[in-house]
Every structure is written in structure tokens, then in C-alpha cells.
Image (spheres, rainbow, N blue to C red):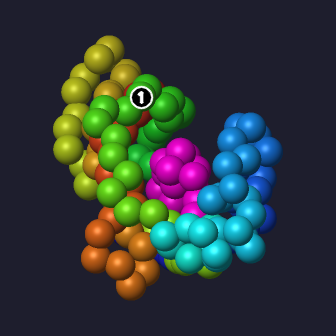
Amino acid sequence: VSDWLLVTQHRVDAFAGATGDHQWIHVDPERAARESPYKAPIAHGYLTLSLHILLRDLVAPDRPYAPGVVSVINYGLNKVRFPNAVRVGSRIRGRFTLSGVEVVAPTVLQVAEQYLVEVEGQAKPACIAESLFRLAF
């Protein structure tokens, strides 16, 4: 489980700028307060998904992903869902569960890991995905 991370309007705006997704529910706090069912701006679902690596690194920042690893390559994702919104100003954390390991070459492992994003004070997670990484030794 990672440390908590505050989701700020600045981070949401920066993600909107990087992706071109400037939908008002994300980037217009006044309109979101008036018109959104969440009564606040919310993070993009794909922003929540993209925080995977940052949150994963917060689990044990002083330790490598695995001993002896030379590189970690993002190989992809399996099923991804966004069952809950992340309001700007909320704190989130990642919960990571190993779900599989496969040898794909003599010095390469493929690791499958469940990524679940918890929102502080909420019962329902914001994101659930299975991520795949290739670890080279």
C-alpha cells in the first residue's frame, strides 16, 4: 500500500493540458461546484490510472521494485474500471497485489499486479486494473 497522495487542481489542469481533455467537470471548479453531481471538479479517470507508477514508487521509495532488476518496462494493462470519481482535494493511495509471474526469457519476468486506487473516506475504489510489467535482470 502506498502513502497518500493529494489530488490537486494543478495536477488535473496539467493532465488536461497534456492530453487535450479540457472537459469542464475537470478544469472549471466554479461550474463543477454548480452543475456536477460531485459538487466539485474531478480527476480524469485516465489521470487516476496514470498515477499507477507514482503511487507504486511510494510503496517503498528507498527500495528497488525487485532486487537485481536492471529495468522495468510497462507491458500493458488488462481489464480497467473506474467505479468511483476522485474529487479534486481528495487523497488517494494505491494498493498493489501480485497476481502472477511468468518467465518470458532467461533474464526476463512478466509480472501481473492488481492496481486498486483507494480514495480516503470512500468505500468504493476509484480505479481497478491489472498491470503487466517486464522485469529484466
Q: Which residue is the site of mark 1?
A: 76
**Image point (45%, 40%), residue name:** 68
Q: Residue furthest bottom?
A: 121
Q: Residue at x 31, y 32 (%)?
A: 78
Q: Which residues are magenta?
A: 42-57
Which of 22/90 is in front? 22
Main SS, magenta region, reads helix
Please tell me whether residue 101 is drawn above or below residue 86 in the rendered image. Answer: above
Q: Residue at x 49, y 70 (%)?
A: 37
Q: Amino acid at mark 1?
A: Gly
Displayed quadrant of residue 125: bottom left
Q: Is residue 116 left or right of residue 5?
A: left
Q: Position of residue 1 (x, y in %)?
A: 37, 68
Residue 118 vs residue 114: left or right? right
Question: Which image quadrant for residue 30?
Answer: bottom right
Q: Is residue 69 above or below residue 25?
A: above
